[in-house]
Image (cartoon, rainbow, N blue to C red):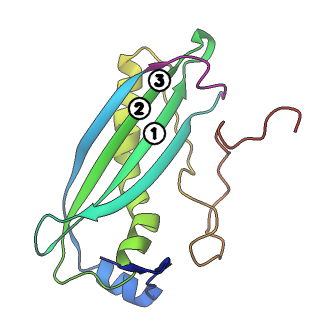
């Protein structure tokens, strides 16, 4: 795993990152945590689906295995009913790794590849749960990945995501 020293994270060149990435062999994607329910209108004033993804450091499943995890929180408004479906899910993606991870690989992988790899599972799970709870069909935004500055300070690609209720300025600001 990449080691952090004095607040700095080791970096890896795009070429070295891609060279190591193609050596990983996907073993499985596991749902390792789930909580779902209806929340009141006080938690969700937005009309849009809100998706918050937080990648966590990989866990050690033994030599030759790389297993990062990502946690999502999705709020899906139910329209005129006034409440929202809330889904919190955590997925772990397990890979066979032919050798130890190069410094900086883990951080870059969790920022760029892990969300793109797991979002189809999130869409399916959330859509299925929302339907079982009687919510309108779920349409997740296309851009659900981080778009703010990368750790390098350079902007990431992609269109800016609509800020969630928690980051949106209060009315009148």
Q: Which residue is mark 2?
A: 87
Q: Residue at x 68, y 44 (%)?
A: 167
**Which is nearer the N-term, disc 3 or disc 1?**
1
Mark pair 3, 1: CA separation: 10 Å
Asked whether the residues under the numbered discs 2 and 3 touch, taking CB atoms below 8 Å apart as contact, a structural biologist would say yes
Which label number is shown at residue 73?
1
Q: Residues within 10 Å of mark 3 (few under 14, many from 20)?
A: many
At label 1, counting other C-alpha atoms closer than 10 Å, the crowd grade (few under 14, some 14-19, many 20 or more) is many
Q: Regarding mark 1 in the picture, which secondary structure is present there?
A: strand
Picture layout, residue 147 above or below residue 109: above
On screen, residue 56 versus residue 86, left or right, reads left
Q: Position of residue 56 (x, y in %)?
A: 36, 58
Q: Element at badge 2?
A: strand
Give the left or right position of residue 31, taking residue 152 as reference.
left
In depth, the one of 36 and 124 nearer the eye is 36
Q: Which residues are drawn in magenta?
A: 38-46
Check the image and report above or below for 56 versus 121.
below
Badge 2 or badge 1: first in the primary sequence? 1
Look at the numbered discs 2 and 1 and tell me whether their residues touch, using CB distance below 8 Å.
yes
Q: Which residue is mark 3?
A: 85
Q: Quadrant of the C terminus?
A: top right
* 9, 104: nearer the viewer: 9
Image coordinates of residue 109 in percent, x first then y, are 39, 70
Q: Whole-Å distance between the Cαs marked 2 and 1?
A: 6 Å
Q: Main secondary structure of the magenta part?
A: loop
- In the picture shown, does residue 15 fall above or below 160? below
Which secondary structure lies at badge 3? strand
Query: What residue is at 13 percent from the left and 75 percent from the top?
Result: 64
Q: Is residue 43 magenta?
A: yes
Horizontal and vertical percent position of residue 29? 23, 52
């Amino acid at each position: 795993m990449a080691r952090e020293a004095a607040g700095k994270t080791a970096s890896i060149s795009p070429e070295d990152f891609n060279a190591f990435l193609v050596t990983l062999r996907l073993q499985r994607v596991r749902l390792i945590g789930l909580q779902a329910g209806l929340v009141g209108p006080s938690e969700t004033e937005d009309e849009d689906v809100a998706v918050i993804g937080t990648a966590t450091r990989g866990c050690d499943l033994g030599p030759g295995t790389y297993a990062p995890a990502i946690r999502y929180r999705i709020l899906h408004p139910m329209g005129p009913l006034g409440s929202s479906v809330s889904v919190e899910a955590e997925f772990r993606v397990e890979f066979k790794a032919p050798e130890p991870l190069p410094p900086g690989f883990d951080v870059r992988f969790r920022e760029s590849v892990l969300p793109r790899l797991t979002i189809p599972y999130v869409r399916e799970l959330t859509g299925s749960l929302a339907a079982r709870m009687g919510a309108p069909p779920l349409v997740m935004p296309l851009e659900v990945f981080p778009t703010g500055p990368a750790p390098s300070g350079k902007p990431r690609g992609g269109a800016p995501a609509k800020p969630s209720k928690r980051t949106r300025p209060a009315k009148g600001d």
